[in-house]
Amino acid sequence: MSNKRTIEIIGAPSDLGANIRGSNMGPAAIRIANLKTKIEQQGFRVVDLGDLHVPIRESLNPEIQKELYLEPIRAICADLADITEGIMDRGNIPITLGGDHSVAIGSIAGILRHFAKKNEELGLIWIDAHADINTPTTSPSGNIHGMPLAVLLGDGHKGLLDIVTKKLRPQNTALIAIRNIDDEEKRILRESGIKFFTMRDIDEKGMFAVMREAIEHAGNGTAGIHASFDIDGIDPRYAPGVSTPVSGGLTLREAHLCLEMIYESKKLVGMDLVELNPIADVNAQSAHVIVDLILSGLGKSIV
């Protein structure tokens, strides 16, 4: 039976925001893991828009490299924002395949713009081993994939902030599975108003209770919830194909429960799946995990 909804897939094959190479190959690996066919088998119509144009690092001049690729990242995110805004305007569901997590600046900015035109708010659930809330003044590395959440909340490089014409509200932002946080990020989180859940919180409360709180926080007064899933939120035993693995992460069942519950809230409007690094993967294990997670987010159930 058809769900009569259309999923639009867009690849954002950029690893310019990270110092470890390889996540630019993520969209291809996810597609090769049979993403389109499996979504269609759940009754959706699928349109694959292909990949954004992303320049090769070696083709960029040394000055751009010194600036940690800020200008090409800005251009990528601006293009992606236009695309996801258009997908939402068509009444469809955007799924963005990364690429490093900096691409979420663009994917989420576009969805925020869509809702802003209707005077509505967006909720966000961000699943990640890292907080990604550094700013240019707090980041130890300067890598932009450690800054996207800060930019979406209104703090960061001006060129990136210009893309985010409607900002996220911290009172509708939840962060799940964090366990590797810089000292300055800890301060920012405590002062932010974001609802955040460390792996200790998940250990103590259980994933069901954590997700119930996160969905309530992200969904309160919002028109929808976007899920931005960095695959390193999962323990590397189950998803080894990442650039920055951190042990002690989510189990596969916890990860699936996360997306199952967001789907069941009837508020899911889009997804990012980011930071897959096929170079580090084992027999495409992590790519297949991502495909299965997307299916859970679109309503696949055990029975």
Image (cartoon, rainbow, N blue to C red):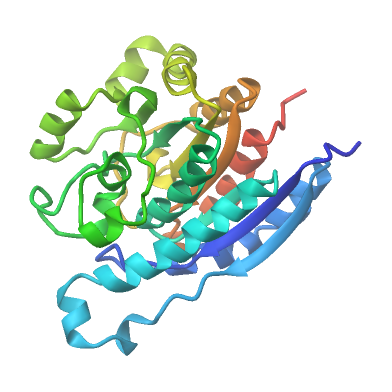
| Quadrant in the picture for residue 195 | top left
Relative to residue 18, is residue 267 depicted above or below?
above
Residue at the location (55% across, 63% down)? 11
| Quadrant in the picture for residue 249 | top left
Relative to residue 62, is residue 88 depicted above or below?
above
Relative to residue 121, is residue 21 depicted above or below?
below
Q: Is residue 267 left or right of residue 303?
A: left
Q: Is residue 283 visible?
A: no
Image quadrant holding the N terminus, namely top right
Residue at the location (78% across, 41% down)? 5
Q: Give percent across and percent down for residue 244.
A: 30, 52
Q: Is residue 303 left or right of residue 175?
A: right
Q: Is residue 243 left or right of residue 86?
A: left
**Residue furthest to the right:** 1
Instruction: Out of 179 and 120, give the one closest to the viewer.
Output: 120
Image quadrant holding the C terminus, namely top right
Q: Is residue 139 left or right of residue 211?
A: left
Instruction: Out of 87 and 236, give the one closest to the viewer.
Output: 87
Q: Give percent across and percent down for residue 236.
A: 39, 44
